[in-house]
Image (cartoon, rainbow, N blue to C red):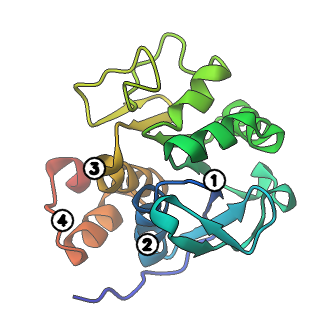
Amino acid sequence: MGFVPMTSSEKKVLIPLAEGFEPIEALMPVDMLRRAGIGAVLASLDGAEIVRGINNIGVAADGPLDGYAMEDFDALYLPGGSRGAVLLRRNATVLKLVRATFNQGKTIAAICAAPAVLKGLGLLENRNFTAYWAIVKGAREECQFLEDGQILTGRDPGAAAVLSLALLRRLAGPETAAAVAKSMGFPVTETEKS
């Protein structure tokens, strides 16, 4: 079942890729956002043209992370993968971009082990969040997805579609999110409709 992209949007999401990322957590939002005409930019932490995720899955980066600034984006999405999330947490450019995104009041989405980046910066204090419980302490592990203010979090790879649709709903509205979900065979919930 194909999907014709809707009117091209000026909106863009930055997605940093680190070696050891979880492919479904990185590529599900790219696919959904691009189906809706929203730019999704995959940026390599180390400038590599191909970034290897778990299971040796290689993904072409659009460019090096240090070549982007959050002023040019509407949201930041951090994919998990235990090794990838550790590298995100240790990268000064990632930390600078997360702080800038937060300070600009823009949306930050993080999934699985990646909410550890937000927690390390103190951005999850007094917030409801979920994450892979074994890596990020204090996460509400019973929840697949949580939204608290400008921060969206997903528990594990199984939450990639739900988190991606929530991000899409924020950036393009519920009708577009519902159309993308339907085109991909996902159930359209009342959340996507409203």
Q: What's the residue type where badge 2 is placed? A: Asp
The residue at which mark 1 appears reads as: 74
Check disc 2 and report its element: helix, strand or loop. Answer: helix
**Residue 79 in view (yes/no):** yes
Above-or-below relation of 102 to 44: above
Q: Tags 1 and 2 in contact by the CB under 8 Å rule?
A: no
In this rendering, which labeled residue sits more in front, label 3 or label 4? 3
Q: Horizontally, is 34 left or right of 40 in the view? A: left
Taking 125 as reference, is 20 above or below it? below
Q: Secondary structure at mark 1?
A: loop
- Disc 4 is placed on an element classified as loop
Q: Position of residue 186 (x, y in %)?
A: 18, 65
Q: Nearer the viewer, residue 67 or 104?
A: 67
Dot 1 and dot 4 residues touching (CB under 8 Å): no
Disc nearer the start of the sequence (1/4): 1
Q: Earlier in the sequence, mark 1 or mark 3?
A: 1
Crowding around mark 4 (Cα neighbors within 10 Å: few <14, some 14 to 19, many 20+) is few
Compute the Cα span from label 1 to label 4: 25 Å
Along the viewing direction, whichever of 8 and 57 lies nearer the viewer: 57
Residue under label 4: 186
Where 10 falls versus 105 (above or below)?
below
Q: Earlier in the sequence, mark 3 or mark 4?
A: 3
Residue 173 position, x and y percent, is 39, 57
Please name the residue that numbered disc 3 is placed on: 158
Dividing the picture into quarters, in which one does residue 137 lie?
top left
**Residue position for label 2:** 31
